[in-house]
Image (spheres, rainbow, N blue to C red):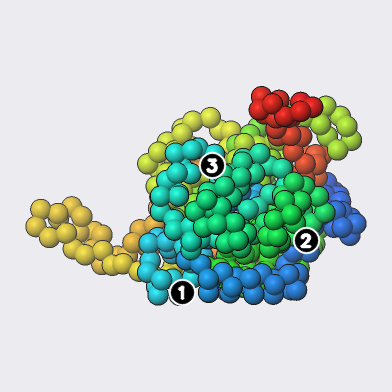
Amino acid sequence: MGDKIRLDISGMLEAVPSIEEEIRDIRPKLAAAGEAVKAKEDKGLLGFFSLPYKNKESGEIKRLAEHIKNNYENMVVVGIGGSALGNRLLHGALNHPYYNMLSLGERGGCPRIFVLDSIDSDHLQSLFDVLDLEKTIFNVITKSGTTVETMSNYLVIRDMLQKKVGPEKAQKSIIATTDASRGSLLEIARQEGYRLLDIPGNVGGRYSVLSAVGLLSAAVSGIDIEELLSGAAYTAQACTEQDPYKNQALMGAALQYLAYRKGKAVSVVMPYWDGLYYFGDWYCQLWAESLGKTISTGGRAIQVGQTPLKAIGARDQHSLLQLFLDGPDDKIFTLIEVEKRRNSFVIPKAGQGGEGLNYLAGSTLEKLLQSEFQATREVLAKRGRMNYKITLPEVSPYIIGQLVFLYMLMTAYMGELLGVNAFDQPAVEEGKKITYRLMGRQGY
């Protein structure tokens, strides 16, 4: 178990002693959720299940990544939502936090990586200010091929490239990642002669991080994408049982579902490791967009969904923890710890005038952070606040692959428990239509 993530419900037992009885009471419902997800997988409806096994595609991505490394100093991912957050997650967790500030040698010869998911003109100009367009490649990512923010940025970038480096070099400086059979970006890419990468038709944006959407920029930065996929494959194979005690994804969904039935309308994810900052953002989209629905899978009018909230320990102990402990008891907490860190610092003795700090001397920063993690767990339990923990033995591509797949599968199970389709986003589509009308698109 040394290289496997672990879900621990002991904090839940302390906060809610009856929780195991409640899990037992919903076993038939959990089994039905497991069967429903498996049936959809068997029918090919859940494409994210197959992503860990696409070896041919990952080989092609690695070859393209090598070409980019040999020819460009910068890579910009142009996307939004699921086309950007997965990239941020992987780079935040697996690369140096100041990766782009390292020298080329310190980056192992890999290009700098930027993620553009804003249509703020000042932000875009600021990006252009730090890029040499002669040495920059852009990966434009949109599953539909019509995402208005992404395609608007693309059109600005294409125009800028053509003016600065000329049409021929501009054509070589854009990669399009989109649906293989439809969409404006696909048609433009064919017309312009861009390199094309496919997003499988049965993989939605928020479930696409293990496809070309997230893998290309990861490979360009030197992340071992084969290990990432191997970790995801491990979780897929380990989480097949309908017994929640033998299936961590199903257990996570069970705890969230029981909490939701108790009025816990907010689901807090709180990693005690700064590198998982963007994991929180990715989780927020995955959980909110998948589960916030007003129509059940049977067509019945409902109103369900938990509001996901990201926090980072120990930073947010000084901003959000007061609310978590003394505020409304409407939250369930997932605390994430990392057992083995890459670095260690011993706290020195304070010296004269700092005698009150000498209890810290000789301890490590890691021990302090772990102590604060444990203190948060204990005080949440004492206040009866529902919480459980996920332990990462270390942070590596293999472990992050496990974590990503665990949460995608947990979301699929939670959708079945709530009786909603976890793979559509009708309200978001409605907002897009209004935007089209306001922008003057014909037919809206």
Q: Earlier in the sequence, mark 2 or mark 1?
A: 2
Residue annotated with mark 3: 118
From where the camera sits, is residue 142 visible?
A: yes
Q: Position of residue 239 (x, y in %)?
A: 75, 62
Residue 110 higher or lower than 37, as above or below: below
Residue at x 63%, y 53% (from the top left corner): 140
- The span from disc 2 to disc 3 (Cα, nearest Å) is 30 Å
Q: Which residue is mark 2?
A: 49
Earlier in the chain: of badge 3 and badge 1, it is: 1
Marks 1 and 2: in contact by CB < 8 Å? no
Is disc 1 surrounded by few (<14), some (14 to 19) or many (20+) residues within 10 Å?
Answer: some
Element assignment for label 3 = loop
Q: Nearer the viewer, residue 266 or 357?
A: 266
- Kindly identify the amino acid type of the residue bearing the numbered disc 2: Phe
Give me the residue at 51% from left, 57% from top.
165
Q: Residue at x 21, y 65 (%)?
A: 348
Coordinates of residue 92 in the picture (x, y in percent): 50, 58
Question: Tag 2, which secondary structure?
Answer: helix
Mark 1, residue position: 109
The amino acid type found where label 1 is placed reads: Gly
Front of the two marks 2 and 1: 1
Q: SS at mark 1?
A: loop
The residue lying toward the viewer, choosing from 393 and 120, is 120
